[in-house]
Amino acid sequence: MAIYIISTTNAEKPWVDEVCQDYARRCQSPWNCEYLTVNAQKRKKGSGVSSLITLECEQMEKRCPKGAYRVALDRRGKTFTSERFAGWMVDRMSHGQSVAFFIGGPEGLADEFRQSCDAQIRLSDMTFAHPLVRVIFAEQIYRAWSIVHGHPYHR
């Protein structure tokens, strides 16, 4: 089973990709993590942001493997503790289905796209900058892996 984290990016800071890739390398089989990005649409004064978000979601959808369980990261989603998220991941893996997580840009995901996903989760009641969401979620995937595999990272 593969885990895909699909997000928008504007190549803002190379360290974000470096940190995400580092956490992905730490996860070992069967938790094969892959980070996929789509370019954020340029925001221009007077342009409709909703149409740009829709376009970004369409691009993310194209990067999503067919048959994957689709999860939107969204402020209205379900919250988990790290331990419960690890258990949720084990449950998802028991179905033999890849999981694709979608992280939108600063304005989030288009409502129609978000609602079409199989599940919605949120990281926190707090608001984080888009690049930090990518890093925090990468760390939580690795933390879930460490919980499941009894690795001392999660104490």
Image (cartoon, grey):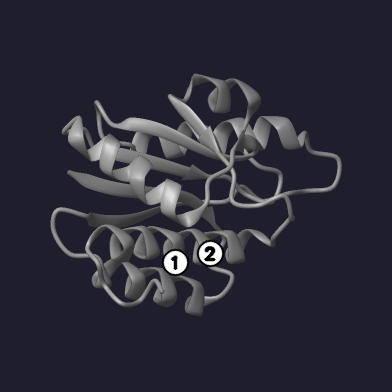
Q: Residue at x 61, y 47 (%)?
A: 41
In the rendering, at what x and y percent does residue 139 appear? 44, 66
In the rendering, at what x and y percent does residue 141 appear? 38, 58
Left or right: 148 as drawn, with respect to 83? left
Number of the label disc, if any, that sits on residue 127: none
**SS label for mark 2:** helix
Mark 2 neighbour density, 10 Å: few (under 14) some (14–19) many (20 or more): some
| Above-or-below relation of 11 to 81 | below
Q: Which residue is mark 2?
A: 136
Asked if disc 2 and disc 1 are in contact, CB closer than 8 Å, the reply is: yes
Q: Residue at x 77, y 33 (%)?
A: 48
**SS label for mark 1:** helix
Q: Residue at x 65, y 52 (%)?
A: 124
Distance of mark 2 from mark 1, alpha carbons? 5 Å
Q: Which residue is mark 1?
A: 139
Q: Amino acid at mark 1?
A: Glu
In the rendering, at what x and y percent does residue 8 appear? 52, 51
Left or right: 112 as drawn, with respect to 126? left
Q: Residue at x 43, y 24 (%)?
A: 118
